[in-house]
Image (spheres, rainbow, N blue to C red):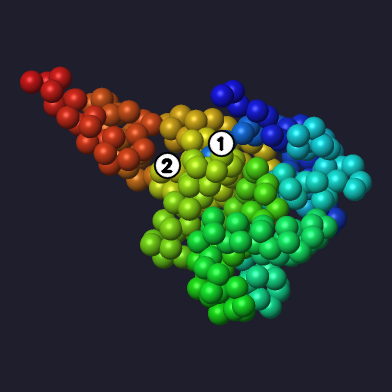
Amino acid sequence: MTAERLIEVSNLVFEYPDGTPALRGVNLEIFSNEFIALIGQNGSGKTTLAKCLNGLLKPTQGYVKIDDLDTREKGTTKKIVTKVGYVFQNPDHQLFNNTIYKEIAYGPRNLGLDEKQVNERVHEAARVCGVEEVLFNEHPFFLTKGLRQRVAIASILAMRPRTIIVDEPTTGQDLRQSLEVMNFLRDLWQNEGHTIIIITHEMPIVAQYAQRSIVLGQGKVLMDGVTREVFAQPELLAQTFVKPPQITRLAQAFSHVGFSPGTLSVEEMTEQYREICQGKS
Ligand SMILES: Nc1ncnc2c1ncn2[C@@H]1O[C@H](COP(=O)(O)OP(=O)(O)O)[C@@H](O)[C@H]1O
Ligand SMILES: [Mg+2]
């Protein structure tokens, strides 16, 4: 199966109305069934880029095309939300209905689907996200943050976008909740064929889940490639104050004895250690 291009970003410049230059000429292509991490220090433009990728913000210069649909064209919003979904960093900025059912139904209703179809969409999205039907009449406010985030993702999934962007899915969650939401996103990628883009500051999460990493610095793409190769260049990463995971840095510190600078896990490091020892004996 060859990868299909889903999103094209060309010379994208974005300035906020107050004149803040948030993106200064971004070029990118996003393909089908990718798992991407968007990384970079605070203020580097990650959230702004994500919002441009789903048409929430329109380019100041350059363009974003989604399946050849230009986000600058008027009247494209309804089509775009069925192609690219954006889950806000704080689910509380996204959830505003008084029951979970209404929350998940909101998008499909807005698309003009009839109630039977809406009901099907709600059940499907809730099932995929592990939101139990017994919760449908609850107020989102009474759920844990992890569950609120699943409801936020379900409300996006109900519009069936191929690409799903999740802004800082693990911030403010404990390790167990973080792994739960990450494994869930991996499942959407592996089993449902979605393209997943996560925005995160947690490099071990990037190493474990993302095949591709895009590093932003001051509104520009500094690096874009296979995660292992991106982490293998600590000097470039340092420009945007991103540090590779500890295990990668340990391997880099011992690269002179044969460890690979692109090591991503303890298992990989152990395996290399075995090989190095065997080479010596
Ligand atoms: N609503 C806004 N109005 C003006 N400037 C903004 C607004 N939102 C973000 N910015 C600025 O745009 C730049 C990029 O911000 P953002 O995309 O939020 O970065 P990140 O998500 O990487 O932290 C920063 O300089 C930030 O201060
Ligand atoms: Mg942000």
For the residues marked 1 and 2, what is the alpha-carbon distance in whole angstroms?
15 Å
Instruction: Classify residue 67 by image quadrant.
Output: top right
- Note whether residue 66 is visible: yes
Q: Is residue 39 above or below residue 155?
A: above
Q: Classify mark 2: helix, strand or loop.
A: helix
Measuring from the top left, give residue 80's x and y in whole percent. 78, 46
Does label 1 or label 2 sit earlier along the sequence? 1
Name the quadrant of the C terminus.
Answer: top left
Q: Secondary structure at mark 1?
A: loop
Dividing the picture into quarters, in which one does residue 129 lie?
bottom right
Residue 51 lies, in percent from the top left, at: 72, 50
Residue 152, position as x, y percentages in the image: 62, 63
Residue shown at the point (29%, 35%) measured from the top left: 268
- Left-right relation of 150 to 162: left
Reading the image, the residue beneath label 1 is 34
Please give the name of the residue rendered at 70% of the width and 53% of the height, measured from the top-left corner. Answer: 159
* Mark 1 neighbour class, 10 Å CA radius: few under 14, some 14 to 19, many 20 or more: some
Query: Mark 2 — residue?
Result: 207
Residue at x 83% of width, y 42% of height: 71
